[in-house]
Image (spheres, coloured by chain):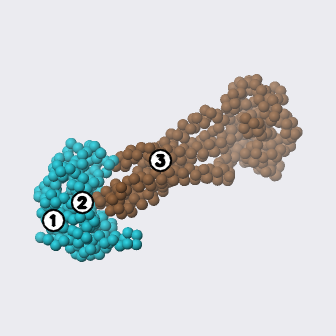
Chain colours: A brown, B cyan
Amino acid sequence: MILSNLLHRPIRTVVSILAIAIEVGMVLLVVGMTTGLLHDAARRVEGLGADIMVEPPGASFFFGLGWAPVPIKVADRLAQIPHVLAVTPVLFQSNTNVGSGVNVIWGIDPASFDRVTGGFVFLKGGMFSGPYDALVDDLYAKAHHVKVGMTISLLNHDFRVAGIVEHGKGSRLFIPMATAQDLASAHDKASIFFLKCTDPGYTDDVMKAVHQLAPQYQVISVREYMTLMTANNLPALDAFITALIAVAVIIGLLVIFLSMYTTITERTREIGILKSLGASKGFIMTIILREAAVLAAVGIVGGFLGALGAKRVILASFPTLSVDLSVEWAVWAALLALGGTMLGAFYPALRAAQLDPVDALAYE
Amino acid sequence: MEPIILTENLKKVYHVGKVDVPALRGVDLLVHEGEFVAIVGPSGCGKSTLLHILGGLTSPTSGKVLVDGNDFSKMTDADRTRFRRHKIGFVFQRFNLLPTLTARNNIEIAQHIQGNGYNPHRFEAVVEMLGIKDKLDYKPYALSGGEQQRVAIARAVICEPKILLADEPTGNLDTENSQVVLNMLRTLNRNFRQTIVMITHNPEAAAVADRTIRMRDGYILPD
């Protein structure tokens, strides 16, 4: 009976399913893209191979958002701490050229950077050979159709692409440290220091030593940084995600409410017939709610498939983005959609159950 | 013989805006088990209201209604619904089949609502008797009026109700189909001692009943 009823009004059924699918897909994609952004940034830091990060006071753990350069000579003092294998300074520069969006460019010292990270994997080209040479990672190159030898505009200057490197080592764009300092008028300054210990087991000891050496600096292990890169630690982002999820759920709920409300209005006489056969209020409510549950189930599956499809399209169109579709959030999205659907169908179901059988049978 | 239906001074008043409209003004009715009773009268005389009260679809304003020993005036809506589920079968003028279901599903849903499950022997016997075996997989729109009414009768009797209440069962049928439906009601009554209360405008339809009760202005007229 439930399937017959749903198939009897195919357009309304499809619209309802679509609304739920969009709700589920939207929840998955909003969460997937925000967590993907954070996880991608975190993975790239992890990919450096450093154990500890040392930043000036007030620096943001979103690289490039804070601007608080410190003397680069601090690196020499950090390098003298026992169990420190290598230290590399990095100067962040935010590139906001029209057309290429906002990118954080890392000014690096290739020699120390290689000691900490083990060096870039060059897919094409090689290291800087001049002050206005740049390295880009493969995803940036794919997204912006960049080739070795091309000139790209960074920080309002033309840079020659010296090499394309495998992604996953901090940034997507690298320029020589001296050039970055020049362009930022921050001579002999750096934004952050990455430390590699002789053994990861010495991380805590080295962090304590850094605290003693420079108590005003922020010292954080890469391991801890990874745990901080979640939406929960970014109140504004968390609120943004919550707001978007709430909007998606409310829209889904309203569509189902309207759909089921018109359903029971159209089927008033049928409800009267069921009542004349002795159907209880519970029976009538169950029919309406089960219909809604079927819509939700199909919509949820549709939402999952839609999100997977959208992920493919997004990654194909914007290779530098990252979309993390987690099972945990798939479960949450399904529960939210099911809950919203049941809530939206509840009042129409209740109203159907409370219809007077004589009035319902006389309904034209 | 014990009466299966007994009403005493039964009254029903509808409130339409600020106006009270009396539909039944004090009906005394007695129907015995196994009887086939026809109720005739002009439109608005209260026949349908009486049938709805006897079927537990609505409650009386005052008076006594005993159906199979149960006093409807003291029962809650849920209790009357439960009683209707097990003891009452309805046949309507407009057939009232569920349009999205096949004839088979329309009959089966009555068994489903009753909760005793599908009884294949009863099902076979009923559809055989009503001559709708080859129509079971059709939806109502694909059936003639007479076939729809036979499916509706099958649905009404599939759960072996104590009382069959028929509200103008031939009102939407031509003469030939009317006769078929009336014959089936007669057969049900004679072969299975099915108690039937039938409302009709049609004197020929009323003639198949054991007894005819006449109503006017919310009263039952004396014989």
Q: Which residue is mark 1?
A: B212
Secondary structure found at label 3: helix
Element under disc 1: strand
The answer to whether marks 1 and 2 sit on the same chain is yes
Distance, label 1 to label 2, CA atoms, is 14 Å
Q: Which mark is residue A16?
A: 3
Q: Nearer the viewer, residue B62 or A279?
A: B62
At 67% from the left and 29% from the top, the residue drawn is A142
Q: Position of residue A247 (x, y in %)?
A: 58, 52
Is residue B109 shown above or below A191? below
Q: Nearer the viewer, mark 2 or mark 3?
A: 2
Give the image location of residue B33, x and y in percent.
15, 66
Using the image, tell me which numbered label, if any, was put on residue B167.
2
Residue type marked 3: Ser
Q: Is residue A262 visible?
A: yes
**SS at badge 2:** strand
Type of amino acid under label 1: Thr
The mark found on residue A195 in the picture is: none
